[in-house]
Amino acid sequence: MHKSQDISHWFAQIHGDATPIPTRERLDGSINADVAIVGAGYTGLWTAYELLRARPELRVVVLEAKFAGYGPSGRNGGAAIAQLNGSREFWAKKGGGREAAVRMERAVQQGVDHIGDAVQREGFDCSYAKNGVLMVARSALEMRGWQESIAADRAWGFEEEDTRLIGRDELQSRVSIKNGLGAKFNAHCASIDPARLVVGLAAAVERLGGTIYEDTRVNRIEQGRAVTGNGTVNAQYVVRATEAYSGWLEGHKRSIVPVHTTMIATEPIPDELWKLIGWDRREAVLAEHPFLHLQHTSDHRITIGGDDPRVPYLSGSKTSTDDHPEQRLQDHLRGQLVKLFPELAEVGIDHAWSGVFGAPRDWAPSVGLDRQTGLAWAGGYVGEGVVASNMAGRTLRDLILNDDTEMTRLPWVRKPGRKWEPEPIRTVGAQVIFRGRLWGERAEERSGRPSKLLALSNRVAGFTGHLG
């Protein structure tokens, strides 16, 4: 059994600190279905939800090794941000041109609103608040980077209503960040309580007639069936929605590797400190060097997570995430929080937890369906999965129903990229790449100039940048 505080602050808010999280019944024997979905995170649940809304008569079964939301869906920072890994140039190449990349980006932006529509329609109590995201600059180099990013947005046809540059005075009037020089503001972002969203989504799938089996680990997927230790689900379509946990499936150890992360949540912050900080609009906040993501929660805390001062890949693609994060990782995040907000030096930390996100070899997600075998897949979001998983659910719905739609014509409908290198090459490569990125970022911070080491590390990794 898993205690809620070991999973995330978000689950602790639902179940309390000491209560083991209850699970649904496990699969017992073999059954038949129209669609079998492996994984009850956002991707699997959005797919089931969209299929059942479109075709209520379908027999949809979701199989989950732990419980709904156990993985990244219940552990993330709660920013539904219109950002997707893969640069505009990458998606233009995959989709056949500039227009395809623009369609891809617009679909990501619209995904934020699709989540909001579902929240309103189903009454999900997940504190959805579409207030945008501030991508903060704390150095002249970072500010120049955001200026160039805004110029690129305009060149690709995105307007001020999508993104705009905010100067120092406006930033400080919105969020009083120490040394904040300005920010890029992206209007297409909502803050959410991620665990309440995934719990509500699972309940909606069941209301619509879907079946979710928990504590049911799938060992392998093949044409026409998903095989577990307790029985087999025979289905015309089998969907792999396992993201960072794909290595648990036979033959998928090198498809997507898990990258480890840490998050902390403060105790509730007193009103007098909020008056000093500002942040009344509850925008999500991103910062660089190191990369950080923050949320002003609906219960008046701050959550913060981001890059760890270590190599966040464990040899053999291990996905153990229930251990309490090392104290040095917690101290690192607390130190970064106080660097941003010195006023919070005496505020306590209530929760700390670990998680993983999935990274494919080309660092960009894919969605697809092999019509000959009936095997479908989605994932590889590289930490940008809150919106992407909703998009994937709608894309898989249309692929499975054989509907030619805007979603099925997006450039991410493609075969997955090549697999990761075998061990020990994978571990050695991760050490070299992540340490190169860390040293490169530190060099940029010291010198105020772009780091050749950082650029080289990204190139060696195959990192394709961000769309949005």
Image (tube, grey):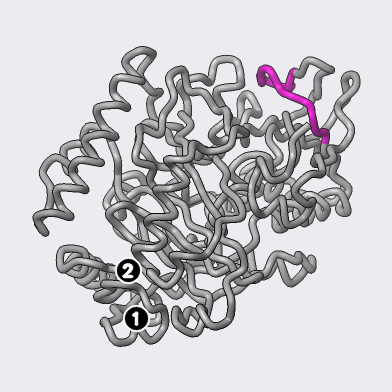
* Disc 1 crowd, CA 10 A, few/some/many (<14, 14-19, 20+): many
Q: Horizontal and vertical percent for residue 136? A: 32, 68
Which residue is depicted at the point 38% across and 25% down?
418
Q: Quadrant of the C terminus?
A: bottom left
Q: Is residue 87 left or right of residue 366?
A: left
Q: Which mark is residue 86?
A: none
Q: Horizontal and vertical percent for residue 416? A: 45, 32
- The residue labelled by disc 1 is 171
Which residue is depicted at the point 90% across and 19% down?
29
Magenta segment's dominant SS is strand
Q: Secondary structure at mark 1?
A: helix
Please, is residue 293 above or below residue 367 in the view? Answer: below
- The residue labelled by disc 2 is 136
Q: Is residue 450 magenta?
A: no
Q: Are marks 1 and 2 in contact (CB under 8 Å)?
A: yes
Chain-order first, disc 1 or disc 2? 2
Q: Horizontal and vertical percent for residue 17? A: 75, 48
Q: Is residue 267 left or right of residue 217?
A: left
In space, the residues marked 1 and 2 are separated at their CA atoms by: 8 Å
Q: Quadrant of the N terminus?
A: top right
Q: Is residue 28 left or right of residue 219?
A: right
Q: Is residue 224 magenta?
A: yes
Magenta highlight range = 213-227
Amino acid type at image mark 2? Val
Q: Horizontal and vertical percent for residue 373? A: 63, 24
Q: Quadrant of residue 405?
A: bottom right
Amino acid type at image mark 1? Leu
Which residue is depicted at the point 43% across and 51% down?
333
Q: Quadrant of residue 44?
A: top right
